[in-house]
Image (spheres, rainbow, N blue to C red):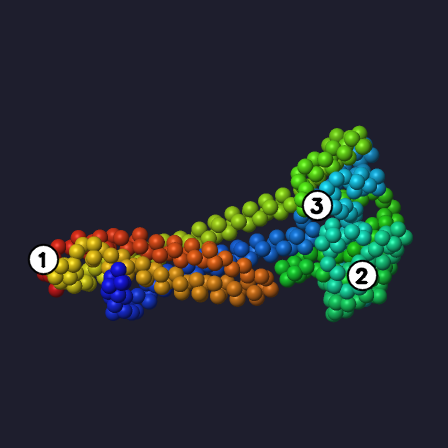
Amino acid sequence: MRDILSCAWKSLARKRLRTLLTAGSITIGVSMVAVVSLIGSAGKTAVNGELESLGISGLSISTNASLSEDGLSGLSEEDLALIRSTGNVETAMPLMIEYSTSTLREVQSGTLICGIDAGAKQAISLSLKHGRLISKADVQSAAMICVVDETLAREAYGRDNITGKTIRLQIGGTQEELEIVGIAEAGSTLLQSLGEFIPGMVYVPYSTLQALTGRSTFDQVAVRVSDSADIEATETLLLSRLERATGTQGYFRTDNLATQRDRLGNLLDIVSLVLTVISGISLVVSGLGIMTIMLVSVSERTREIGVKKAIGASRSRILWEFLAEAVTISLLGSLAGIAVGGGAGWLGIRAFGLEVPIDGAAFGFLILFSVLLGGVFGVYPALKAARLKPVDALRQE
């Protein structure tokens, strides 16, 4: 086998330019697949990380307004207490949402006001950058304080830490001033790059938002279930307890955010697979290129093949020599493709500030697939060379 590989390498070395160009076609195909694979993996990791950072991992409980007798909907304090008393519920946080216009240092912008309580850090993974979060005392006193995300702070002041400043919010037709006691992280680079499309966030005690809007109910309750619990069983239990307590049927609804996140992950996997398959077509084209070049090589080396057979070389020896050449070209091209594609993908992904998940097994499979593909497309030229008759081959000029 070593002798066969040595002969194959010498044959390829005699036609360096042809070998490099043929291996280059494999390099292009492999690098395309590697880049698409890296981008797909990085995208899925980034999206999952963002959803996790936004608290998209538990349950969301809300109500169906169309089934309400007065046309209004919302969860009450009694509903919240019942949810919190349910087994396997780790945290349950009331959530109110109002879209408003905020004015910070005379800079106006569209803003989402979120009414929350002291459990925001656990319930929706709210991360603090400066100052403090909303406390139980703030909720109990309906304090006129808030936590804003760093995007709003930068837009108005050009810096993150603006604790102690005041912000004006348009609520219910009136301007309300709130003191900023904390700055929350706006998310990673992925979300920050969408800043012009995603409004700034202002977090206030839910009791404060109730007082300012005149509402007494919540839009929804964010529930985080303990890690050891069955989230679907807990979801069913919560619904049944709420319906029994209120004597309603179908009024409450739950969204299993973890399931939705998994579905989104599956969708991203499918998209990544489709793109990988499409880019993989270039590998098949490269395989055809290998077969074409190997057929040309057989034609050019017909007399050489005849001489080898005349001095005792067997059909299998000739067959394996040409197969070894095809496989060697594929191996060189695939290794270069992994280096080029992996490097380009890494640089591109890092340029967006995202983590690059390196999957050694996937790269190994890609190299193996490329080598096998080269071998498959090298079979016909190798068979053609092996079946040449010595007498006919030696007549070739």
Residue 43 rendering spot, x and y as whole percentages: 56, 56
Residue at 72 percent of width and 35 percent of height: 237
Residue at 79 percent of width and 46 percent of height: 94
**Mark 2 secondary-structure assignment:** loop
Residue wearing tag 2: 132
Front residue of 175 and 18: 18
**Mark 1 secondary-structure assignment:** helix
Q: Is residue 45 visible?
A: yes
Residue wearing tag 1: 391
- How far apart in space, not on screen, are marks 3 and 1 (Cα)? 80 Å
Classify residue 18 by image quadrant. bottom left
Q: Is residue 212 visible?
A: no
Q: Is residue 183 above or below residue 48?
A: below
Residue wearing tag 3: 226
Number of other residues with Cα within 10 Å of mark 2, as a class: few under 14, some 14 to 19, many 20 or more = some
Marked residue nearer the N-terminal end (1 or 2): 2
- How far apart in space, not on screen, are marks 1 and 2 (Cα)? 91 Å
Marked residue nearer the N-terminal end (3 or 1): 3
Classify residue 160 by image quadrant. bottom right
Q: Amino acid at mark 1?
A: Val
Residue 366 rendering spot, x and y as whole percentages: 42, 56
Quarter of the C terminus within the rendering = bottom left
**Mark 3 secondary-structure assignment:** loop
Residue at 80 percent of width and 39 percent of height: 82
**Left or right position of 82 against 284:** right
Front residue of 94 and 71: 94
- How far apart in space, not on screen, are marks 3 and 2 (Cα)? 26 Å
